[in-house]
Image (tube, helix red, strand yellow):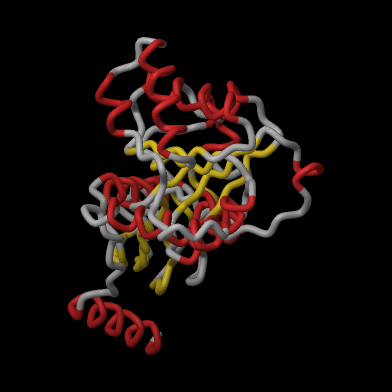
Amino acid sequence: MSWPKSEREPCVHHWYEALADCQRRGLAHACAQIVTSAGSTPREPGSQLVVTESQSFDTLGGGRFEQEVIETARLALARGESGCRLESFSLGARSGQCCGGHVEVLITLYPAPAMQVALFGAGHVAQALEPLLGELGWHVDWFDNRSPQVLGNMAHAPTTCCHFGLSADEQLERLRPGKHCLIMTHDHALDETLLAAMMARNDQVSLGLIGSDSKRARFARRLRNRGLPSACIEALRCPLGNSGGDKRPRAIAIAIAAELLTLNQASPAPILRGLPREALARLETAVAVKGTE
């Protein structure tokens, strides 16, 4: 199922806009910055470029040099690397340019968040849960079929992307694989429609449905009648969390977040490390040489 390009990639031009948008959307991305230069170069130190798996934003000067920076960043992201790395580029034979200069480029890698949540419904529990997920640094795609005008101006975490006013089919079209899906809409029929479609696709990490034991039994019977896989039905988490009988929305939200933490133990957030000593020493040397020019 295709993901609309406008939702997959930021529609911006400047590196700082792209950086903010990538982090909000939970996209894997890298920020490349020229930190020092010598001789003739296409851009000055401080110039920055943001790279995603299929696009780049702003420029370090173009040409083969910029393309090599992009390829280096994408290769590191594809390997799941995180943190900082310092790359040297001679603007001659390696980069196919005749400037004759030399640049050091600091590439900071931001892999996609390890925890990706799709939250369906914007009721009281969802409104209490979303900021908790944001505080944990998890990326959330938040769906509801009601329009923003009906829902009102709801604040949300920077790592949350809202998809409001969409039909069930439109929500499912925007749902990317590999999510922990939490279904808690205001309509049981909509809950069932979404859940059945997700089980048929069978491309999500986990499925959770808010409700009681009786709701689970009723839904399980209906899903079996639809011919959906027994393994998917058995794996469904319902009720969600364990609030100890406390029915307040925030208590339920805390219990759900705690349950998600146990599901996330196998994929901890990557550690963003700084530059190794060797790279720092090389950078200090380059700066010292620059100061004598």
Q: Quadrant of the C terminus?
A: bottom left
On the image, the x and y values in percent for residue 152 come to 78, 50
Determine the residue located farthest toward the left in the rendered image.
Answer: 278
- Could you tell me which residue is drawn at 31 percent across and 65 percent down? 83
Q: Which residue is at the front of the view, 158 or 223?
A: 223
Residue drawn at (36%, 62%) of the image: 107
- Residue 39 screen position, x and y as percent: 41, 70
Residue at image coords 29%, 18%: 229
216 to the left or right of 264: right
Does residue 50 show up? Answer: yes
Q: Is residue 71 above or below residue 35?
A: above
Residue 257 percent coordinates (x, y): 42, 57
Looking at the figure, which quarter contains the N terminus? top left
Q: Position of residue 46 (x, y in %)?
A: 50, 71
Query: Is 277 rendered above or below residue 86?
Result: below
- Whether residue 88 appears in this view of the structure is no
Position of 162 compared to 281: left or right?
right
- Of residue 199 and residue 293, the one placed in the foreground of this image is 199
In the depicted structure, whether residue 227 falls above or below residue 288: above
How many labels sit on residues? 0
Nearest the camera: 24 or 82? 24
Q: Residue at x 53, y 44 (%)?
A: 141
